Image (spheres, rainbow, N blue to C red):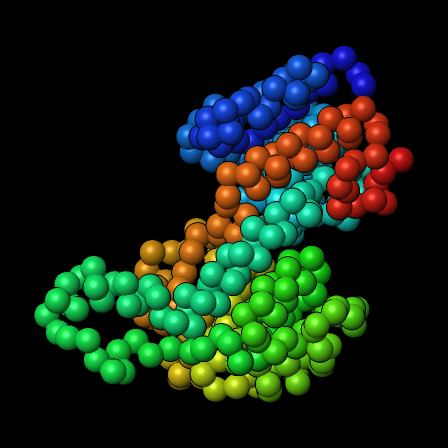
Amino acid sequence: MKENPRVFVSDGMDGLARRAGRDLLAPLRAAADCRVWPHVRPAAREDLREELAEAEGVLCLLTDVLDAELLAGCPDLRVISSISVGVDHIDLDAATSQDIVVGNTPGVLTETTADLAFALLLTAGRRVVEAGDFLRTGAWAKSRWAIDSFVGRDLHGATLGIVGLGPIGQAVARRAQGFGMRVLGWSRSGREVLGVRGVALEQLFAEADFVSLHVALTAETRGLIDARALAAMKPGVVLVNTARGGVIDQPALVEALESGQLGAVGLDVFESEPIDAEHPLLGFPNAVLTPHIGSASVETRVRMVDLAVANLLAGLRGEPLPACANPGAER
Ligand code: GLV
């Protein structure tokens, strides 16, 4: 590795380091001339442009958009290491054509993200947030226990349709089997998974009582869950998304909630993040909404940072990355 390569880190991650009890960036500081974004506010596009103009490596978050136009202004950049499994915020073709290797963090967040997907299936299905708000606002104290209060949907005995059978979809399937659900699955490659009945998307929509999305956001999956797909689902279906907001046509989703076609939704991701505080989705009591926390456990976030640092160091040394999202760029 060149002595002291210039590296930009778009977030100091002090809070996570405190929780982990160690400096997560220490290996990077030891090997590189490391500039860490010093502000509380996130680095804006113009900041990134400036910071990356002379950088050879960058450790970034899924909120840092590195598109072709921005990358064109980064002549020295050799490695992008994102602390995320999703890389839809990076133009992989542009990076590859500039010989920039891109690292990501698959594997280490699989179970934690599947836990959140399952939490949303349970919470939306059993109306946990809505019922909790009823108690907290004092409404329960002013009324009584009623036989039909907050009746929701059973997971056991119901059919779950998993869209996307990669590692996270498979981890959700294992949980669903433990809960006594019948599991249907669809993947573009037709992948076979033990205990999951592989079906066409149309059949999955027609039969599933719960649908959980686990596809990466690509040109093919953008808007996959559009008005037609929503109309093809069983009336009253519970839809959960922990993948990327762009997989769902959000205005169509709002309409399907308004019409009652959707029984409930559990959404951790949105077309635009953070979601506007005035967004119509916030008005539905049967919409359980969380702020993109799929991988948010201390252990998993630390594993993600460690892997991303290892990716960056390997790339700077000219070695294969432990997890590379554009193997075509590896020399
Ligand atoms: C989270 O959404 C990730 O891509 O890691």
In front of the other: 60 or 147: 147
Q: Is residue 225 above or below residue 315?
A: below
From the image, which quarter does the N terminus lie in?
Answer: top right
Where is residue 159 drawn, in percent x and y? Answer: 57, 80
Where is residue 78 drawn, in percent x and y? Answer: 76, 31
Query: Looking at the rendering, which quadrant does residue 290 occupy?
Result: bottom left
Is residue 256 toward the left or the right of residue 308 in the image?
A: left
Query: Looking at the rendering, which quadrant does residue 243 occupy?
Result: bottom right
In front of the other: 323 or 99: 323
Where is residue 222 drawn, in percent x and y? Answer: 63, 65
From the image, which quarter does the C terminus lie in?
Answer: top right
Is residue 285 toward the left or the right of residue 169 in the image?
A: left
Residue at the far left in the pictured view: 142
Query: Looking at the rendering, which quadrant does residue 122 occupy?
Result: bottom left
- Residue at screen point 20% across, 59% down: 136
Q: Is residue 272 above or below residue 91?
A: below
Is residue 326 toward the left or the right of residue 205 in the image?
A: right
Q: Is residue 200 above or below residue 297?
A: below
In front of the other: 143 or 275: 143
- Residue at screen point 75% across, 41% down: 323
Where is residue 96 drawn, in percent x and y? Answer: 80, 43
Report whether residue 68 is seen: yes
Total of numbered circles in the picture? Answer: 0
Residue at the far top in the pictured view: 3
- Residue at screen point 65% across, 48% down: 85
- Residue at screen point 77% across, 37% down: 322
Report whether residue 229 is seen: no
